[in-house]
Image: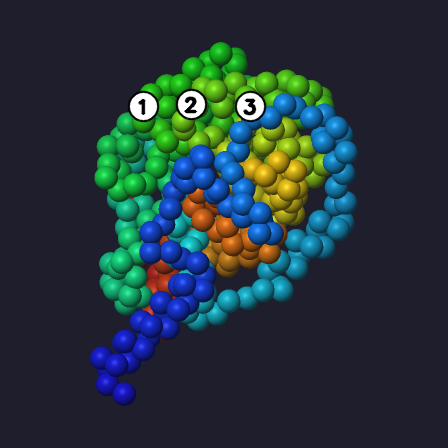
């Protein structure tokens, strides 16, 4: 076989792998609110809207921790993808990634470099070897502090990549409520397309679900047309039942996404916590006909971990939740490892991490 024919054969096999993994040629961001944004068991689901707080739904929630742990332990062992299928799933992970910098020493230049990486998340030579130029692959969003929203918006102009801002006294969420609401409004006015808010954990500990509902609803109102991700701070919530109940209340209050962590807690995203949250999303979808997105954040650093999370989403919620408008990783650190794995796929060799810088 000639080199030309070999390359064409490899390209065709990669195209089939990408199609099988669901990597579309146009990576969607936010579907129109009036349209179906997902399906579950053949049922079309619409975008989330606020509904009245139903305390019966909250009170009936129980969690069997041992059963959750057993199921979570099987996620990385029951499913595996190799070769071109693995490459396709890793490309999907990139498309669903919120490339993030939330450091105390952030600068405008660092944010601009991060935005450049978001536009071109893998090296051009790898793009060409994979044969995916037409995908226009980019990350799902860039996430920054409010102070850098305008910088990110300007750097991403024309790319179609949304800017997300962490808000509401991130990461503790303990500043006065009027200040947190005003912070949301300022970020939206600065051009943020998405707002990652943090809840007051004390409302969960005290079982004050009315206060939690009112707080999340107030943040959602301040977001206007911007999509809102509600960070539960699951590492602080102590029990899986608290996680499930906080998830349901945030969804009833109108959250577009529920998110595990700020990334600043001692314990961040874990598969058992993720399993509880996605099953809460599934039950909520079955009851309301509305599809809420999910974002695990913190502690996800390797390509293998990204495959575990994608497998869980596929098994628990289905193909619809493998799109950027329904699923995000808060995991910038894993991009370098994904790029290394893709280089191994096309060359058969692993490269050093320093050859795949983020910013």
Secondary structure of the residue carrying tag 3 is helix
Which residue in the protein does label 2 denote? 224
Q: How crowded is mark 2: few (under 14 residues within 10 Å), some or many (20 or more)?
A: few
Looking at the rendered image, the quarter that the C terminus falls into is top left
Q: Determine whether 202 is above or below 274 in the image.
A: above
The CA distance from mark 3 to mark 1 is 21 Å
Image x and y of residue 204, in percent = 67, 26
Give me the C-alpha separation between circle 2 and circle 3: 13 Å
The image shows residue 147, relative to residue 62, as above or below, that is above
Nearer to us of marks 2 and 1 is 2
Q: Do the residues labelled 3 and 1 touch (CB within 8 Å)?
A: no
Is residue 280 among what the camera can see?
Answer: no
- Closer to the chain start, of discs 2 and 1, is 1
Task: Indicate the quadrant where residue 248 lies.
Answer: top right
Observer able to see residue 168: yes
Q: Is residue 7 left or right of residue 230?
A: left
Q: Position of residue 82 (x, y in %)?
A: 48, 70
**What's the residue at 60%, 60% (across, down)?**
76
The residue identified by callout 1 is: 190
* Residue at the image position 60 percent from the left and 56 percent from the top: 315
Please state the horizontal and vertical placement of residue 189, each as a whole percent of the image: 33, 21
Q: Is residue 284 left or right of residue 259?
A: right
Badge 1 crowding class, 10 Å Cα cut-off, few under 14, some 14 to 19, many 20 or more, is: some
Measured from the top left, where is residue 348 in percent x and y? 36, 73
> Which residue bears the numbered disc 3?
216
Q: Do the residues labelled 2 and 3 touch (CB within 8 Å)?
A: no
The quadrant in which residue 212 appears is top right
Q: How far apart are marks 2 and 1 (CA)?
A: 13 Å
């Amino acid at each position: 076989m000639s080199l030309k024919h070999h390359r064409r054969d490899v390209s065709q096999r990669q195209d089939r792998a990408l199609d099988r993994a669901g990597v579309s040629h146009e990576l969607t961001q936010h579907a129109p609110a009036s349209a179906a944004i997902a399906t579950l068991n053949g049922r079309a689901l619409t975008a989330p809207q606020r509904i009245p707080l139903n305390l019966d739904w909250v009170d009936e929630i129980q969690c069997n921790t041992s059963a959750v742990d057993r199921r979570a332990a099987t996620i990385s062992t029951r499913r595996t993808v190799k070769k071109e299928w693995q490459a396709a799933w890793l490309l999907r992970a990139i498309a669903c990634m919120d490339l993030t910098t939330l450091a105390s020493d952030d600068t405008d230049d660092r944010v601009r470099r991060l935005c450049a990486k978001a536009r071109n998340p893998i090296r051009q030579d790898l793009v060409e070897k994979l044969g995916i130029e037409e995908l226009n692959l980019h990350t799902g969003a860039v996430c920054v502090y409010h102070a850098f929203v305008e910088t990110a918006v300007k750097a991403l102009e024309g790319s179609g990549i949304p800017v997300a801002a962490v808000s509401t006294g991130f990461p503790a969420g303990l500043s006065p409520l009027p200040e947190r609401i005003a912070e949301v409004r300022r970020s939206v006015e600065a051009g943020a397309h998405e707002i990652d808010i943090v809840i007051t954990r004390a409302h969960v500990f005290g079982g004050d679900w009315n206060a939690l509902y009112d707080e999340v609803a107030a943040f959602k109102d301040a977001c206007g047309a911007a999509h809102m991700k509600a960070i539960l701070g699951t590492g602080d919530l102590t029990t899986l039942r608290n996680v499930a109940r906080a998830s349901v209340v945030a969804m009833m209050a109108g959250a577009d996404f529920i998110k595990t962590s700020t990334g600043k807690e001692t314990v961040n995203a874990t598969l058992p916590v993720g399993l509880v949250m996605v099953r809460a999303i599934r039950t909520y979808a079955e009851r309301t006909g509305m599809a809420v997105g999910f974002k695990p954040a913190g502690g996800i650093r390797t390509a293998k971990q990204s495959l575990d999370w994608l497998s869980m989403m596929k098994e628990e919620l289905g193909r619809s939740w493998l799109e950027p408008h329904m699923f995000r990783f808060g995991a910038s650190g894993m991009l370098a490892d994904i790029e290394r794995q893709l280089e191994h796929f096309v060359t058969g060799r692993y490269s050093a991490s320093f050859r795949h810088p983020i910013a």
